[in-house]
């Protein structure tokens, strides 16, 4: 039986989305001799649950881990895969070896009072050991996997795992179906253009780092949200509003269309930093 709170959806034979209600999703792809997982999840115990769920599917060993980006809830389980090649973007690597970045995140995680926060103290943050810059192809179990980088967005090193024949893409945190991504580390100058490239992929389904499986229309909706967000912050700046006024007016503008999206209620926390980045 799968870990409580998770649902494992077989998208195609051997291609699974492991959805975790309210937490972080992962992907599982079964090859001829081994298994590839997409995102190692938040702390080692979460990675061990993921490994257990993989074992329910197949006895093949996990030989590849792909980090969609550096954020702790996607990559802090990496240490549980000592025999795997861990693949990520070179900027993901750079973030994960950045001492200040790691300390800041560790502080956030350990002070959060969540059931996993104490375990955050003992995480041995393990960066990817294979990186790429713009794209990388893998042929895995007879399947083509195109790993793509389209530019900075949710972080500096977000990558997408595109299965062109199956018309599926794993998007990490750049796009969610009906959810607002965390904006605290984002690159609002670059994100809209990056999203244009992502939404141009000829896909039918996408698996986000959070929330349900989406269709192509939902992927375009996620792109439109970022465009609307950035445009409304920009127009607040053009109007001469300060960060506080801008946050308020942006929230007012976006609420009718996006107020019901997951995490929309937390958007105010990081709007001032988005404002500063766009103003610079
Ligand atoms: Zn993230």
Image (cartoon, helix red, strand yellow):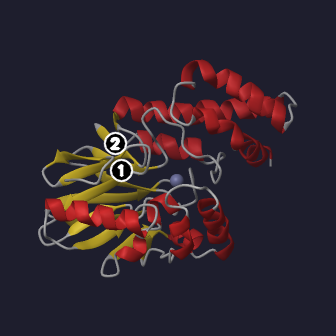
Q: Is residue 203 visible?
A: no
> Residue 136, labelled with which disc?
none
Q: Residue 206 vs residue 123: left or right?
A: left
Q: Residue 116 vs residue 64: left or right?
A: right
Q: Residue at x 70, y 22 (%)?
A: 252
Residue 216: quadrant of the picture: top left
Circle 1 packing at 10 Å, graded few (<14), some (14-19), many (20+), is many
Q: Position of residue 132 (x, y in %)?
A: 44, 70
Residue toward you, 252 or 164 = 252
Residue toward you, 271 or 76 = 76
Residue toward you, 49 or 199 = 49
Circle 2 packing at 10 Å, graded few (<14), some (14-19), many (20+), is many
In the image, residue 83 above or below residue 169: below
Residue denoted by label 1: 170
Residue denoted by label 2: 206
Q: Position of residue 137 (x, y in %)?
A: 30, 64
Give the number of marks: 2
Q: Position of residue 93 (x, y in %)?
A: 52, 72
Q: Residue at x 62, y 51 (%)?
A: 186
Residue toward you, 72 or 29 = 72
Q: Which SS class for mark 2?
A: strand
In the image, residue 84 above or below residue 2: below
Q: Residue at x 13, y 72 (%)?
A: 33
Residue farthest toward the bottom in the current orientation of the protein: 83
| Comes first in the chain, label 2 or label 1 | 1
In the image, residue 174 above or below residue 29: above
| Tag 2 near tag 1, CB within 8 Å | yes
Q: Residue at x 45, y 66 (%)?
A: 43
């Amino acid at each position: 039986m799968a870990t409580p709170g998770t649902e494992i959806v077989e998208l195609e034979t051997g291609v699974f989305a492991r959805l975790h209600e309210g937490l972080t999703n992962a992907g599982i792809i079964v090859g001829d001799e081994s298994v590839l997982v997409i995102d190692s999840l938040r702390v080692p115990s979460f990675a061990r649950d993921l490994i257990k769920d993989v074992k329910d599917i197949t006895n093949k060993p996990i030989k590849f881990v792909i980090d969609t980006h550096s954020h702790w809830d996607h990559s802090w389980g990496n240490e549980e895969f000592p025999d795997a090649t861990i693949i990520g973007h070179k900027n993901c690597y750079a973030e994960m070896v950045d001492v200040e970045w790691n300390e800041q995140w560790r502080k956030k995680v350990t002070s959060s009072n969540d059931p996993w926060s104490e375990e955050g103290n003992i995480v041995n943050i393990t960066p990817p050991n294979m990186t790429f810059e713009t794209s990388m192809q893998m042929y895995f179990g007879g399947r083509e996997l195109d790993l793509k980088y389209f530019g900075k967005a949710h972080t500096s090193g977000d990558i997408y795992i595109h299965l062109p024949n199956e018309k599926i893409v794993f998007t990490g945190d750049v796009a969610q179906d009906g959810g607002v991504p965390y904006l605290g580390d984002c690159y609002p100058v670059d994100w809209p253009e990056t999203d244009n490239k992502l939404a141009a992929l000829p896909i039918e389904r996408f698996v986000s780092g959070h929330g349900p499986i989406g269709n192509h229309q939902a992927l375009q909706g996620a792109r439109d949200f970022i465009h609307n967000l950035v445009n409304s912050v920009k127009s607040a700046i053009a109007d001469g509003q300060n960060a506080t006024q801008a946050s308020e007016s942006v929230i007012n503008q976006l609420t009718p269309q996006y107020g019901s999206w997951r995490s929309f209620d937390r958007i105010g926390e990081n709007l001032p930093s988005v404002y500063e980045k766009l103003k610079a």
